[in-house]
Amino acid sequence: DDWLAEQHARHQAHLEHRKRSSAKKLQREAARKTKLQRRKASFEAELLSDESETEPFSSEIEEGSSQYAGAVVVPDGYRENNLNDLNFDDEGDEMDKKKNQKKPSRRR
């Protein structure tokens, strides 16, 4: 009978501990979320203040130019489709293919 009572007490202690630790975990999670939200809000505020500082500049750029001054403009679809047609150094490609072949794993 003592044994059963001890088991019961241990089990109750275990449940209490789980309750406490899950509450702590939830607290930590909530703290993390609010911290993230605060960081995001301050970041967005910073972005807005940066934008308001650069407004006069963006209006100085003449019409029809790219909205990103000095950016290299790549036509849509160019980067994905035409990379293979650029014919870089073919030998280099072969070397890369050999180098990137899957090596047999050493772990046993």
Image (cartoon, rainbow, N blue to C red):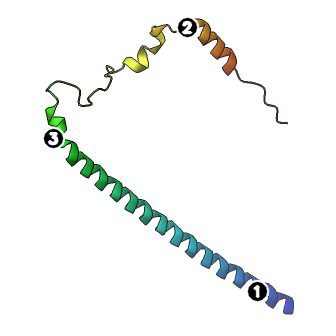
Q: Are marks 1 and 2 in contact (CB under 8 Å)?
A: no
Q: Amino acid at mark 1?
A: His
Q: Are marks 2 and 3 in contact (CB under 8 Å)?
A: no
Q: Which mark is residue 89?
A: 2
Q: Which mark is residue 56?
A: 3
Q: Secondary structure at mark 1?
A: helix
Q: Is residue 84 above or below residue 19?
A: above
Give the percent coordinates (x, y) of residue 74.
Answer: 33, 20
Q: Which mark is residue 70?
A: none
Q: Secondary structure at mark 3?
A: helix
Q: Is residue 46 above or below residue 73?
A: below
State left or right for residue 10 relative to residue 15. Answer: right
Q: Quadrant of residue 35?
A: bottom left
Ranked by sequence position, the earlier of labels 1 and 2 is: 1
Which one is in front in this view, the residue at disc 2 or the one at disc 3? 3
Which one is in front in this view, the residue at disc 1 or the one at disc 2? 2
**Crowd around label 3: few <14 · some 14–19 · many ≥20 (10 Å):** few
Q: Which residue is mark 1?
A: 8
